[in-house]
Structures are given as structure tokens and as C-alpha cells.
Image (spheres, rainbow, N blue to C red):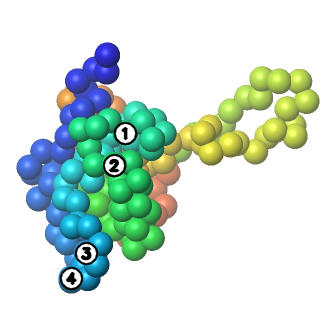
Amino acid sequence: MIPCLLFMDITNEQWHLASPIIAGAVPAKQVTGMPRVDDRSILNGILWICRTVAPWKDLPDKYPSYQTCHRRFQDWVDKGVWENILVRLAMDLKKRGKIDLAECFIDGSFAAAKKGAAELAKLSGERVPRSWRLQTAMVFLSPFPHMEQAPMKLTSLRKHYQKAL
């Protein structure tokens, strides 16, 4: 049984922050194909994947198909929409005093466990430390307000953070 925490969707307030960013990236008119799946349900599916770190194919039936969610996620990443959504959510967390982006860093250290692991020093995609985007999404959607954000490095958010000061 999957805990109900894993099915927590974004709130209306969070959606009001993210929806203008998504709307700005949506094509004016879809000419052919199936009707466009609701962006909010897609965002909830993507955030479920981010929270659980599960493979796309394990996306529950509650959300749109994993292919649709993955395709939209790739599109949003390519267009910079995903980063803008997470920056907007992070700025909201900052305003509410839930996160301080100036004190963030990522610890990418690990210890090899196998003999002769020097050849295996490069991490596979599954073992890469979680990004600030994923950490932000997890904190923003956490029902535990006391949950602390993992310290991360402030590089790509610097210009956004400076504007917010």
C-alpha cells in the first residue's frame, strides 16, 4: 500500500503561482491530435515522480499516462518552464520564511564500495544526488512545515534570488 503522502497534489495557491508560467509556454492552438491533457494533472504527476524518484512507468493511474507526463516534462525543461516554476515556488517559500536560498549547497560526495571501483567512479543516472529543483518541490509539497531543506549551492538561482531581496 502506498502512503497517502505520496499522492499529495499541489494546492490552489501553488497552482496559481505555476499556472501563468505554464500558460505562457503553451502553443496558442493545437492543430491536430488528441485534446491537450490538463496542465495541473500533468504537474501533479511530474511532482509525484520527483517526490518518489520512481521510474516514469510506475506513475499511478490517478495521473495522466506516464508518456504524456514525461513528454510534457521534457518540453517544459527544454523551454525553461520547469526551472521557472520551481524558482517561483522557491521564491514563495522564501517569502513565507520556509526556505533561505542563500544558505544552499549540494553535497555530491560518495564512497565507492567495491574493490577496483576507481573505474566506476562516474555515477550512473540513478545515483546522481538530487537537484535543488527536486529538493524545492519536495519541501514545497511536504505536509511537514518543520522539514528542513537540504543545503544546496546557489548558482542558477542567483539572479532570481537577488531580485527578490
Measure the C-alpha gap from mark 4 to mark 3: 8 Å
Task: Inspect the image, locate mark 1, and give the three-letter code of the amino acid beneath it.
Answer: Leu
Residue corresponding to mark 4: 29
Q: Nearer the viewer, residue 126 or 85?
A: 126
5 or 84: nearer the eye? 5
Q: Amino acid at mark 2?
A: Ser
**Mark 2 highlights which residue?**
65
Q: Which mark is residue 26?
A: 3
> CA separation, marks 1 and 2?
7 Å
* Marks 1, 2: nearer the viewer: 2
- Please say whether residue 108 is visible from this viewpoint: yes
Proximity of marks 1 and 3: CB atoms separated by less than 8 Å: no
From the image, state whether disc 4 or disc 3 is nearer to you.
Answer: 4
Q: Which residue is mark 1?
A: 59
Crowding at label 1, few (<14), some or many (≥20) Cα neighbours within 10 Å?
Answer: some
The answer to whether marks 1 and 2 mark residues whose Cβ atoms lie closer than 8 Å is yes
SS at circle 1: loop
Give the percent coordinates (x, y) of residue 155.
49, 61
Mark 1 vs mark 3, CA separation in Å:
23 Å
**Quarter location, residue 115:** top right
Give neighbour class at mark 3: few <14, some 14-19, many 20+ (Cα, 10 Å): few
Q: Is residue 9 left or right of residue 54?
A: left
Instruction: From the image, state whether disc 1 or disc 3 is nearer to you.
Output: 1
Q: Nearer the viewer, residue 157 or 30?
A: 30
Quadrant containing the N terminus is top left
Query: Between disc 4 and disc 2, whose residue precedes?
Result: 4
129 above or below 115? below
User: In percent of the image, x 20 and y 40: which residue is there?
Assistant: 9
